[in-house]
């Protein structure tokens, strides 16, 4: 029996300067274990991630985005 639970996390990013930022973040976050889906919205600077919180925490995602060169934090909307 699997106990895996996927949650949807929304983050707001800072420092987007061009659309190529989107693919850099999607690649970096998409490599994390437990991440099923990553969508980066350039115009609104939103990052949506579907992930298993037992495998990859929100802090792990924020750290991966920081390694790509951007600042992000959890957002309620």
Image (cartoon, rainbow, N blue to C red):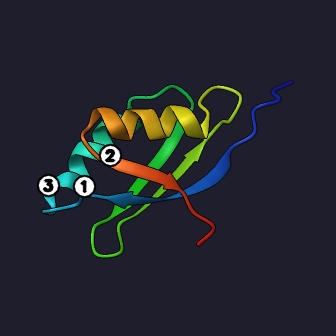
Distance CA(mark 1)–CA(mark 2)? 6 Å
Mark 1: secondary structure:
helix
Image point 59% across, 54% down: which residue?
Answer: 9
According to the image, label 3 marks what residue? 20
What is the tally of numbered marks visible in this picture? 3
Where does the image place residue 37, in percent across and percent down from the top left?
Answer: 48, 47
| Marks 1 & 2, CB-CB < 8 Å contact | yes
According to the image, label 1 marks what residue? 22
Where does the image place residue 59, in percent across and percent down from the top left?
Answer: 56, 36
Closer to us: 53 or 73? 73
Quadrant holding the N terminus: top right
Could you say which disc has been placed on residue 26 in the image? Answer: 2
Could you say which disc has been placed on residue 34 in the image? Answer: none
In the image, residue 53 above or below residue 46: above
Distance CA(mark 2)–CA(mark 3)? 10 Å
Image-based side of 44 in relation to 55, left or right: left
| Marks 1 & 3, CB-CB < 8 Å contact | yes
Mark 3: secondary structure:
helix
Closer to us: 69 or 31? 69
**Chain-order first, disc 2 or disc 3:** 3
Distance CA(mark 1)–CA(mark 3)? 5 Å
Give the quadrant of residue 5: top right
Quadrant holding the C terminus: bottom right
Image-based side of 4 in relation to 72, left or right: right
Image-based side of 47 in relation to 50, left or right: left
Closer to us: 49 or 69? 69
In the image, residue 43 above or below residue 3: below
């Amino acid at each position: 029996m699997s106990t895996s639970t996927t949650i949807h996390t929304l983050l707001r990013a800072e420092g987007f300067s061009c659309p190529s930022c989107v693919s850099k973040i999607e690649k970096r976050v998409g490599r994390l274990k437990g991440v099923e889906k990553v969508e980066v919205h350039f115009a609104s600077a939103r990052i949506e991630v579907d992930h298993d919180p037992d495998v990859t925490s929100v802090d792990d995602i924020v750290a991966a985005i920081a390694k790509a060169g951007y600042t992000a934090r959890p957002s309620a909307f």
